[in-house]
Image (tube, coloured by chain):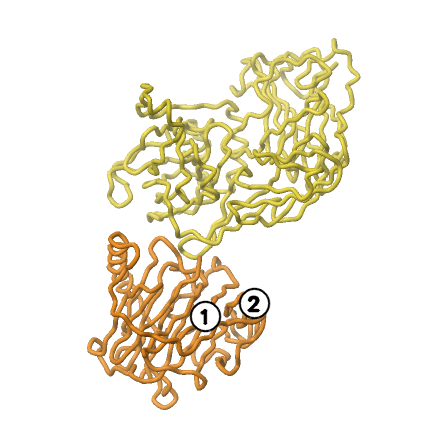
């Protein structure tokens, strides 16, 4: 979520081409089962289903809000002001969380949006973390479902570690990115891959973004297709993921990763989350 | 070059109202009838229009008044270094070869495009420009399923463009594969290229939005027996870049429903049949997407015919009236390409025929075979009925043209009378009778054409059009 650069992005795109080829290969040969992955005996240990009435605020025993503009647009030159208003973060009444970025001045910011986190209220170590999400779209719109290490306040970023389960650029609505940031490989040097839906878009329907995470590895999934595995021995620094992380969801507007919104960016833009579920191996 | 559009319209009308067609290329079409042809009514599903050459059955027709040599193949400037592209040389302003570049690529047999979601192509130009219109669904006839982009920006780099098919299920026998029209940019000609033109089943277009009646909830007067149409329609779709693109489309893509079947019945051709007095709300959708904007018809009762003319038949030359014998007329709607939007939905109530111009911007009535000798006549009469609202900017311009000594449109010897009727002259929901003296014409012995052009006037009826003394 934090940083990236163009070179990295092109590399991701290139890699996504290779992944697509694999996907097509599987779908051509075996329509029912796309991959032979190790069986895991996962049990649901926590879920947030976002049930409630339209406009209702979130469960405050789970979620807290990041408010304002952070330091230099949350470290990324983002343009929005994050609010806890139901205009920006609420339930939609159809069983979804809605985080809405608006073309609406607030303070000295030209846009408002929302960023929520489970910090100090729910965190988890290892297992499967998944969310069923329909993405917003438009140039400069930057949605993310991500995690930060619980010890961020003691050791700082990137020493705490960051796992981006999903982050996307609204001008590339077919592509999601799964990335980790850690000491020695953060921001532009982060490790990850892009995944493309090919002839489809992440803003047309819900898709399940997930990681399956264990000792010294993290696997990245879209709709149960594993498109990347990152292991401890391939990061050029310390592996800081064998510990508890908390979750975040947000929609940024502008910033280094995504670029500026344009006059053609449609607003408002809403990230819809049907559920978040956490499983652990028995 | 949108600002040139009106100019082009006028040039098209002034230059030539007949189709000036030129068959540039006809690929061989088998005339052999075999059993398959007899048994199968299905159409080709070929997606390619132009990849490195004309796809099977594709033909080209230049628009009337355009430079008929504007289109050619180019073997050097191609997308991705492929074999050939389509090159369009837009003429300079006032070029003797034609005032703009424009034409239609079509297949005479039609294709089944119901498996595709968009027409896509790559385009570039010799300089940054905006192409007036590019689209598909122009079939040299009814143009029932026309979709187009206006003001398409092009520059010196190849870019991919998408024209969505709003409802693919309707395109089971489409002839119009691609059409374009472009005038000079600031008076100067230039060149643009198009390549890799094909229909694609692309999943990268999203969030379609349809509008009708200008995105407003309009109420209109209507009359039993007089069909009405929706108008002012639009269709936007989100491109793979995340931004929306507005597209022009024809009303035939809209599926309509009536709230009150005792007042309005929608027939299977989506025609709005007015069957009884009362109120009916008409809502539309495009391929399941509800359109914003509605039409409410306030039906008063039966339609009142235009007042019967009082002139003796001996002193009348009639163009359109049930009260006189009419002279031969070439057409009451020339469907002038590419900028005319006017569609004819003429009707008959109790034996009285009435001209009905819907989606009106301009339209022409031509009587050139033979021209009319009105040298013994003093005036021309029109009865005009406006069912919709008359706003402060509503204007109807009527032009009567004599074809001069040569008896043909153009040739430098024509003359016109032009009369404007403004909101002060026009009454909604009633017949407006207008009489125009012929004294302004040079040669009343060879009259050939009436042109109507309107502003803020989407629909009118006309009847009792005749010369009298």
Say above or below: B164 vs A112: above
**Label 2, residues with CA under 10 Å away: few <14, some 14-19, many ≥20:** some
Q: Nearer the viewer, residue A139 or B454?
A: A139
**Residue at mark 2:** A93
Residue B65: in sight, yes or no?
A: no
The picture's colour for chain B is yellow
Chain containing the residue with disc 2:
A
- Give the image quarter of residue B219: top right
What is the spatial separation of the Cα atoms under label 2 and label 1, in whole angstroms?
A: 13 Å
Q: Nearer the viewer, residue B28 or A134?
A: A134
- Give the image quarter of residue B348: top right
Say above or below: A132 vs B463: below
Q: Which corner quadrant holds the C terminus of chain A?
A: bottom left
Q: Is residue A107 left or right of residue A217?
A: right
Q: Nearer the viewer, residue B119 or B34?
A: B34
Q: Residue furthest right?
A: B310
Pointer 2 and pointer 1: residues touching (CB < 8 Å)? no
Q: Is residue A94 left or right of residue A159?
A: right
Chain identifier of the orange chain: A
- Give the image quarter of residue B380: top right
Are tags 2 and 1 found on a single chain?
A: yes
Q: Which mark is residue B330?
A: none
Q: Which mark is residue A275?
A: 1
Q: Position of residue A106 (x, y in %)?
A: 55, 73
Q: Is residue B305 left or right of residue A254?
A: right
Q: Position of residue B116 (x, y in %)?
A: 39, 42
The residue depicted at 52 percent of the width and 40 percent of the height is B253
Chain containing the residue with disc 1:
A
Q: Which corner quadrant holds the N terminus of chain A?
A: bottom left
Q: Which numbered disc flags the more N-terminal residue, 2 or 1?
A: 2
Residue B239: in sight, yes or no?
A: yes
Q: Position of residue A165 (x, y in %)?
A: 36, 71
């Amino acid at each position: 979520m934090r940083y990236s650069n163009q070179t990295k992005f092109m590399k991701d795109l290139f890699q996504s081409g290779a992944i697509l080829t694999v996907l097509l290969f599987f779908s051509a040969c075996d329509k029912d089962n796309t991959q032979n992955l190790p069986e895991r005996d996962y049990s649901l240990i926590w879920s947030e289903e976002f049930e409630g009435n339209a406009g209702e605020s979130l469960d405050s025993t789970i979620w807290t809000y990041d408010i304002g503009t952070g330091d230099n647009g949350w470290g990324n030159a983002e343009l929005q002001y994050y609010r806890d208003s139901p205009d920006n973060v609420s339930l939609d009444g159809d069983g979804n969380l809605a985080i809405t970025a608006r073309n609406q001045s607030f303070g000295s910011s030209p846009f408002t949006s929302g960023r929520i986190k489970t910090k100090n209220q729910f965190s988890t170590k290892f297992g499967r973390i998944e969310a069923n999400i329909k993405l917003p779209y438009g140039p400069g719109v930057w949605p993310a479902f991500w995690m930060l290490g619980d010890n961020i306040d003691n050791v700082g970023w990137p020493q705490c570690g960051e796992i981006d389960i999903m982050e996307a650029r609204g001008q590339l609505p077919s592509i999601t990115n799964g990335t980790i940031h850690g000491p020695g490989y953060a921001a532009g040097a982060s490790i990850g891959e892009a995944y493309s839906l090919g002839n489809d878009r992440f803003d047309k329907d819900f898709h399940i973004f997930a990681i399956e995470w264990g000792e010294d590895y993290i696997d990245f999934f879209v709709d149960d297709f594993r498109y990347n595995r990152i292991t401890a021995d391939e990061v050029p620094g310390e592996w800081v993921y064998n510990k508890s992380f908390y979750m975040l969801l947000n929609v940024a507007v502008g910033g280094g990763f995504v670029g500026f919104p344009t006059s053609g960016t449609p607003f408002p833009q809403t990230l819809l989350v049907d559920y978040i579920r956490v499983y652990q191996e028995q | 070059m949108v600002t040139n559009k009106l100019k082009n319209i006028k040039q098209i009308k002034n230059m030539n109202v007949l189709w000036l067609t030129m068959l540039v290329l006809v690929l061989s079409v088998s005339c052999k009838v075999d059993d398959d042809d007899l048994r199968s009514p299905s159409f080709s599903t070929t997606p390619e229009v132009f990849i490195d050459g004309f796809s099977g059955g594709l033909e080209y027709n230049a628009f009337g008044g355009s430079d008929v040599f504007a289109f050619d193949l180019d073997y050097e400037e191609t997308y991705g270094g492929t074999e050939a592209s389509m090159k369009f040389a837009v003429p300079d302003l006032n070029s003797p070869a034609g005032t703009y570049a424009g034409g239609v690529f079509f297949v005479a047999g039609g294709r089944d495009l119901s498996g595709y979601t968009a027409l896509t192509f790559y385009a570039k130009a010799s300089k940054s420009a905006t192409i007036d219109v590019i689209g598909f669904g122009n079939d040299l006839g009814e143009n029932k399923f026309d979709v187009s982009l206006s003001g398409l920006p092009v520059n010196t780099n190849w870019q991919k463009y998408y024209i969505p098919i709003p409802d693919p299920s309707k395109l089971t026998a489409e002839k119009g594969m691609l059409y374009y029209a472009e005038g000079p940019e600031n008076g100067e000609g230039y060149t643009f290229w198009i390549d890799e033109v094909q229909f694609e089943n692309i999943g990268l277009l999203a969030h379609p939005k349809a509008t009708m009646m200008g995105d407003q909830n309009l109420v209109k007067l209507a009359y039993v027996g007089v069909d009405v149409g929706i108008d002012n329609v639009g269709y936007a779709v989100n491109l793979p870049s995340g931004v929306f693109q507005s597209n022009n489309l024809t009303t035939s893509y809209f599926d309509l429903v009536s709230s009150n079947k005792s007042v309005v019945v929608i027939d299977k051709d989506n025609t709005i049949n007015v069957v009884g007095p009362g109120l009916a709300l008409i809502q539309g959708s495009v391929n399941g997407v509800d359109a914003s904007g509605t039409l409410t018809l306030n039906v008063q009762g039966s339609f009142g015919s235009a007042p019967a003319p009082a002139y003796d038949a001996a002193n009348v030359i009639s163009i359109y009236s049930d009260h006189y014998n009419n002279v031969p007329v070439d057409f009451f709607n020339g469907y002038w390409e590419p900028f005319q939007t006017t569609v004819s939905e003429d009707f008959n109530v109790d034996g009285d025929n009435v001209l009905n111009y819907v989606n009106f911007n301009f339209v022409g009535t031509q009587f050139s075979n033979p021209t009319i000798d009105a040298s013994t006549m003093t005036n021309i009469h029109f009865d005009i009925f406006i069912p919709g609202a008359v706003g402060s900017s509503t204007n109807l311009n009527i032009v009567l043209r004599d074809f001069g000594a040569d008896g043909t449109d153009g040739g430098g010897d024509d003359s016109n009378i032009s009369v404007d009727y403004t909101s002060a002259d026009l009454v909604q929901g009633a017949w407006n009778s207008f009489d125009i003296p012929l004294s302004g014409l040079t040669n009343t012995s060879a009259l050939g054409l009436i042109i109507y052009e309107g502003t803020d006037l989407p629909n009118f009826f006309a009847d009792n059009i005749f010369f009298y003394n």
